[in-house]
Amino acid sequence: MSELVNEERHGSGTVLLRLNRPEARNALSDALRKALTDRFAALYDDPDARCVVVTGDERAFVAGADIKVMAEMGTAEITRTNIRRMWGVIAHCPLPFIAAVRGAAYGGGCELAMHADIIVAGENAKFAQPEIKVGIMPGGGGTQRLLRAVGKFKAMKLMLTGEPISGREAFEMGLASECVPDDEVLDRALELAGQIAAMPPLAARRIKEVVLAGHDTSLEAGLMLERRTFDTLFDTEDKAEGMRAFIEKRKPEFKGR
């Protein structure tokens, strides 16, 4: 496993991925993107994984792309990189994904956080889409995910000025699920991951699947998908266990079946 992404297992089912390129504030080099892509891809078929948390360090979640490398690229070169594969693998990961953001989440870092299902932000974290300042634009989903998260007018201000906002501001505008003191970010993210990992994993995966699929379709189509997916869970062992445990007033033991 690449030393650029350190993996830890916490509790029963929580996978913590720590980005480990501190000398560049976790800027997304080709090697770091590949390491992160490979780790997410491996989680697809990991029977022991129920929730994934991604974090950086105190200085940076991800401080954007590696500008020194990108400065020498033309259209053909950037097209041939594995950038889009990384975004696709992360976007389609079936596990609930929590981003624990401290420090800078600039450019690709903000986009990586927006691929998460839950964002826990430190009060002094910094979110930004500053690509315009170096003559380009967001290319990892920023124009679309930021728009859907905070609305047109706030999204356009952030992207057209490139100016950062704090973790507290991100929370207030709907870009973060929670905002906590910086030194509590990772503990809170792991606490949430532990709660989710203790839930029936099939139900958790189906919730994520339906929310994301329904987000970009009509209400009626989304409701139809919800109803049909809801019905499929009634043939699972976890549904039977959960309802028996509720009736018997005991803690359920979910197996993911």
Image (cartoon, rainbow, N blue to C red):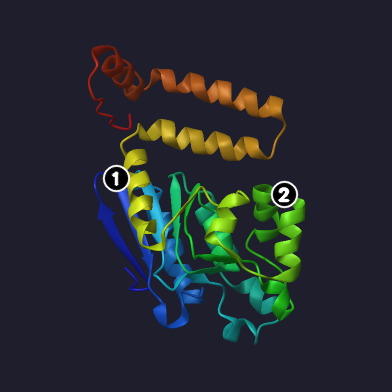
Q: Quadrant of the N terminus?
A: bottom left
Q: Considering the numbered disc 1 on the image, is that residue within a helix, a strand or a loop?
A: loop
Q: Residue furthest top?
A: 247
- In the drawing, does residue 229 fall left or right of residue 257? right
| Image coordinates for residue 252, horizontal then vertical, percent | 26, 25
In the rendered structure, the answer to whether residue 143 lies left or right of residue 204 reads right
- Percent coordinates x, y for residue 120 in the rendering: 46, 53
* Picture coordinates of residue 18, whole percent (x, y): 36, 65
For badge 1, the amino acid type reads Gly
Tell me, for residue 4, which label it has, or none.
none
Quadrant holding the C terminus = top left
- Seen at 37% across and 45% down, the residue is 192
Q: Position of residue 37 (x, y in %)?
A: 46, 62
Residue 23 visible in the picture: yes
Instruction: Give the residue at mark 2.
Output: 151
Left/right placement of residue 238 relative to residue 113 reads left
Check disc 2 and report its element: helix, strand or loop. Answer: loop
Q: Foreground residue, 205 or 114?
A: 114
Which of the 4 image quarters holds residue 78? Answer: bottom right
